[in-house]
Image: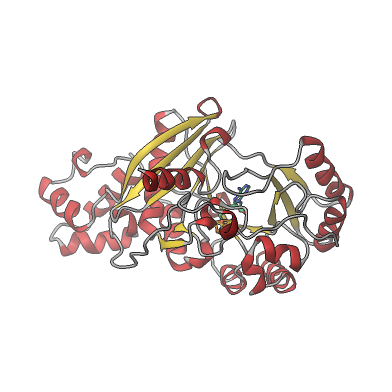
């Protein structure tokens, strides 16, 4: 196995003051309408003294008509609208900035939470689908060496409602462009399996057939490999897509890139993935951020093929999205193709996925990192 040319710790290369560390207010979590299931809403409506059917009407306004304000719900009594706007506010996230790239096909929204945290959501249009990339935490505790979000550390988990609000915003945005939001990927800021309960509650709400009705097979959870939670996920009734961020085929290299590998090394991770595949019969995706001189050699490609041989899986090569303050680089096109073809020759299903919105820092945490740096400097 080739040793990586350079695997510096992210903390050692971040310039002082470049990325603001976030204070960690872990106090009261916001609770709004987006945190509620339809059943919860029915209980609230009845508790407020209104007939239960009103809840379904409100639900339809929010998730079918995609309105963002109680004022727009014209067939709901003003007294209920007023009571709900206090008991279950709709304004959990305030859009701070919206950026567009790829000829309008990628839209990135920076949101501020009620307690002043900043997070980002990316909406991507393709010919056959519209996908939103959702954040589940502000920052992330895993600290992957090449990831802008990892540089921040963890500020706090997002609530289910703060995740639903991102999806509702994206659905609205898509609708305004004559499109329908079809797919959800948990590939924004944060580690979804470190915020397991809220993530599952979120998925339950967006999956509701009377609401946004996003099918489980259109929802992908991406994880750095939190083994006990992969086992928990295998037991869930919903058949979600699982993507595992592998990035290296051996423990030494993977631990230097994805520190959680020290706790859940590759053999343990693969065993949990095998259990997942056996239990669900679902194909697992492996994400592989390709970095020049780090994890892109032919030898590493062959080791990766050997590791994955015989598994019901698919490899998604993501040519690295370079982060300003980190030293990692994207290989050239020939290097990317060479790596992919070694996997394909070994009969491993492989695609190369170029990140959308490069010019607006659409990769995981990058825009937010810049926003923080700007705020810190001003
Ligand atoms: N925490 C989860 C999901 C969010 S990150 C996870 O790690 O899987 C989503 C994907 O983006 C992961 O595969 C992650 O490794 C990858 N990623 C992070 N920073 C990147 C970068 N600078 N370039 C390319 N991919 C990156
Ligand atoms: Fe966290 Fe995923 Fe970024 Fe790693 S790649 S630091 S797990 S968000």
Q: At 82% from the left edge and 63% from the top edge, which residue is drawn?
A: 307
Q: Between residues 292 and 353, which one lies in front from this camera angle? A: 292
Q: Position of residue 190 (x, y in %)?
A: 50, 58
Q: Is residue 231 above or below residue 165?
A: below
Q: Between residues 117 and 131, which one lies in front from this camera angle? A: 117
Q: Position of residue 204 (x, y in %)?
A: 44, 59
| Image quarter of the N terminus | bottom right
Farthest residue, direction top: 103
Q: Is residue 28 visible?
A: yes
| Image quarter of the C terminus | top left
Q: Is residue 113 left or right of residue 245?
A: left
Q: At 47% from the left edge and 65% from the top edge, which residue is drawn?
A: 195
Farthest residue, direction left: 79
Q: Between residues 139 and 83, which one lies in front from this camera angle? A: 139
Farthest residue, direction front: 16
**Residue 37 lies in what quarter of the image?**
bottom left
Q: At 41% from the left edge and 33% from the top edge, which residue is drawn?
A: 175
Q: Is residue 168 left or right of residue 181?
A: left
Q: How many marks?
A: 0
Q: At 50% from the left edge and 27% from the top edge, which residue is drawn?
A: 104
Q: Position of residue 344 (x, y in %)?
A: 84, 47
Quadrant containing ligand 2? bottom right
Q: Position of residue 178 (x, y in %)?
A: 44, 28
Q: Is residue 239 visible?
A: no
Q: Is residue 181 above or below residue 349?
A: above
Q: Is residue 103 above or below residue 40?
A: above
Q: How is the image coloured?
A: secondary structure
């Amino acid at each position: 196995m080739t040793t990586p040319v350079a695997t510096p710790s992210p903390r050692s290369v971040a310039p002082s003051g470049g990325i603001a560390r976030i204070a960690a207010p872990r106090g009261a979590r916001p609770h709004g309408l987006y945190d509620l299931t339809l059943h919860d809403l029915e209980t609230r409506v009845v508790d407020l003294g209104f007939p239960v059917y009103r809840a379904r009407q409100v639900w339809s306004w929010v998730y079918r008509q995609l309105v963002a304000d109680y004022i727009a719900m014209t067939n709901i009594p003003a007294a209920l609208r007023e009571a709900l706007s206090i008991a279950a506010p709709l304004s959990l996230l305030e859009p701070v900035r919206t950026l567009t790239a790829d000829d309008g096909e990628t839209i990135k929204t920076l949101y501020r939470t009620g307690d002043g945290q900043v997070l980002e959501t990316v909406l991507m249009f393709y010919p056959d689908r519209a996908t939103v990339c959702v954040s589940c935490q502000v920052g992330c505790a895993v600290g992957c060496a090449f990831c802008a979000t990892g540089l921040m550390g963890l500020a706090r988990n997002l609530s289910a409602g703060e995740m639903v609000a991102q999806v509702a915003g994206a659905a609205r945005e898509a609708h305004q462009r004559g499109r329908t939001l079809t797919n959800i990927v948990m590939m924004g800021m944060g580690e979804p399996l470190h915020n397991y309960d809220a993530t599952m509650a979120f998925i339950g709400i967006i999956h509701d057939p009377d609401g946004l009705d996003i099918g489980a097979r259109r929802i992908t959870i991406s994880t750095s490999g939190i083994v006990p939670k992969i086992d928990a996920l295998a037991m869930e009734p919903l058949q979600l897509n699982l993507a595992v961020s592998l990035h290296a085929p051996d423990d030494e290299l993977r631990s230097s890139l994805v520190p959680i590998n020290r706790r859940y090394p590759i053999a343990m991770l693969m065993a949990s993935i095998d259990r997942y595949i056996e239990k669900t019969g679902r194909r697992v995706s492996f994400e592989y951020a390709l970095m020049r001189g780090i994890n892109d050699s032919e030898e590493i490609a062959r080791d990766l093929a050997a590791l994955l041989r015989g598994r019901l899986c698919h490899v998604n090569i993501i040519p690295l999205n370079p982060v300003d303050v980190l030293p990692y680089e994207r290989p050239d096109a020939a290097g990317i193709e060479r790596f992919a073809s070694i996997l394909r020759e070994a009969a491993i299903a492989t695609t190369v996925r170029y990140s959308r919105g490069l010019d607006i820092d659409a990769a995981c945490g990058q825009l937010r990192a810049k926003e923080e740096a700007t705020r810190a400097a001003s």
